[in-house]
Image: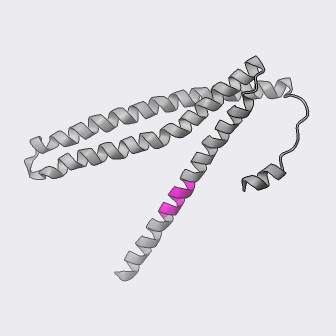
Amino acid sequence: MENLDADFIPQVDGELDAMAKSYLLSTAKWARFLAIVGFVFVAIIVLVAFMAGTIFSSMSALAPQMGAMSGSFGAVFTAIYLGMAAVYFFPTWYLFKFATNAIKAIEHNGSSLTVAFSNLKSCFKFWGVMCIIFIGFYGLIAVIAGIVLAVR
């Protein structure tokens, strides 16, 4: 698909006009804001992972009837939330790199605009692949649910 996209790229002669630079600069500033908010959410997810994991692990002392299950649930909870934080970190990082490179390219007339758009492409590609994975996962759940209901 990327080879097909290369055939349809229009050739641009010259540089961006002032209005395009203004729009791109505004977009990059909003992207930087959203990336910083994303990093804050990643940090919160990591903190929740360790705090809730510790709480669930200590529940075995408070509720002995749960036994070792509560301790292992804490470790599973921590692992799941750390995985979620890792997944959310990468598109946030790509968005941040897009923003910083785009702002640098516009303010200093640098050649980092290509790097900025490469990072933006990586961000959207990452979210696209994640959407495909989740749609496939939901489809698999629907098929399994249909089989279970049909067997009943």
Furthest toward the top, the residue is 108
Percent position of residue 52, x then y: 27, 38
Query: At 14% across and 50% down in the image, what residue appears?
Result: 68
Q: Quadrant of the C terminus?
A: bottom left
Percent position of residue 136, x then y: 52, 62
Report whether 65 appears left or right of 90.
Answer: left
- Residue 77 among magenta residues: no
Query: At 44% across and 34% down in the image, what residue appears?
Result: 42
Vertical comparison of 116 with 6: above or below:
above
Report whether 85 appears left or right of 111.
Answer: left
Query: At 56% across and 57% down in the image, what residue appears?
Result: 132
Here the colouring is one colour
Report whether 138 appears left or right of 22.
Answer: left
Q: Quadrant of residue 43?
A: top left
Percent position of residue 95, x then y: 60, 34
Q: Quadrant of the N terminus?
A: bottom right
Percent position of residue 8, x then y: 84, 50
Report whether 55 appears left or right of 8.
Answer: left
Query: At 88% across and 37% down in the image, what residue appears?
Result: 12
Q: Main secondary structure of the magenta part?
A: helix
Vertical comparison of 82 with 39: above or below:
below
Numbered disc total = 0
Furthest toward the right, the residue is 13
Extent of the magenta region: 131-138
- Residue 136 among magenta residues: yes
Furthest toward the bottom, the residue is 151
Q: Quadrant of residue 83?
A: top left
